[in-house]
Image (tube, grey):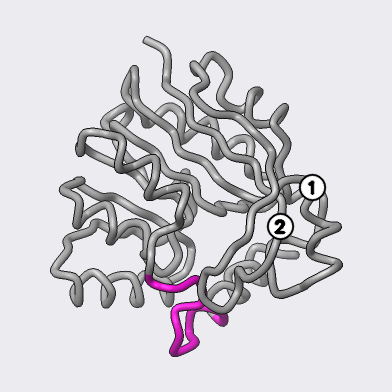
Amino acid sequence: MSAQQWLDKWNQSFQRAEYVYGTQPNVFFKQEIDRLTPGRILLAAEGEGRNAVYAARQGWQVSAFDISTAGREKALKLAAEAGADIDYQVGELPELHFDAAPFDALALIYAHFPPHLKSGYHRHLAGLLRPGGTVIFEAFSKNHLAYRQQDGRVGGPDKLEALFSEAEILQDFAGFSIQTLETREITLSEGLFHNGTGSVVRFVGHKPG
């Protein structure tokens, strides 16, 4: 899939009237962010803004990005309705020029970047965390294809190389201290696109230093 096709796919999805992943925060993200003292957080591939808005309402200073202008428009609408303030940029990560190491937390919630970019993006994002900062990650595992074939309503990529393994996470976030790293079966109920049973990798880690 070309870069333009990838962009068109997400703009088309987010142009729907409905919030395709719902307006409530992801369960794992909420669980983990609620454990932390609010500071500065960056949410990658944030789509329609459900997690960014939740974090802002909890007192976090929120930055987010995605490639989709349609996603940003819906995120800012959701934020306005919630009385929340978020800084949401659109574009490819290397072009956005976030300052190095200002963030206390980084969230990657179903941030399935194109396979040839994902590890490089993870390392770039790790560089934006301050020493001791926390990364919260949940995305579909390489086991997920079997679940998707059984029930397409659960969503997720249909190519193995777009999915994640614990080994990839350990490599991409080398040196991080691990609070959580697991592959597990979960049941999702998130808007139109995440419904049913699937397999995910969950990771919570702390940047060394």
Residues at discs 2 and 1 in contact (Cβ within 8 Å): no
Q: Name which residue lies at 17% across and 63% down.
A: 84
Label 1 sits on residue: 161
Label 2 secondary element: strand
- Specify the label residue 17 is tagged with: none
Q: Name which residue lies at 20% across and 46% down.
A: 60
Residue nearer the viewer, 209 or 119: 209
Report the span colored magenta. Answer: 12-23
How many other residues sit within 10 Å of disc 1, few (<14), some (14-19) or many (≥20)? few
Of labels 2 and 1, earlier in sequence is 1
Q: Is residue 149 above or below residue 26?
A: below
Residue nearer the viewer, 123 or 142: 142
How many other residues sit within 10 Å of disc 2, few (<14), some (14-19) or many (≥20)? many
Q: Which of marks 2 and 1 is in front?
A: 2
Label 2 sits on residue: 198
Label 1 secondary element: helix
Image coords of residue 202 (percent x, y): 58, 39
Image coords of residue 182 (percent x, y): 64, 33
Q: Is residue 13 magenta?
A: yes
Horizontal side, residue 85 vs residue 145: left or right = left
Q: Name which residue lies at 20% across and 38% down.
A: 38
Q: In this view, does 62 lie above or below 90?
A: above
Q: Does the magenta stretch include residue 117?
A: no
Magenta: main secondary structure equals loop
Rounded to the nearest angstrom, the CA distance separating label 2 from label 1 is 17 Å
Horizontal side, residue 8 vs residue 208: left or right = right
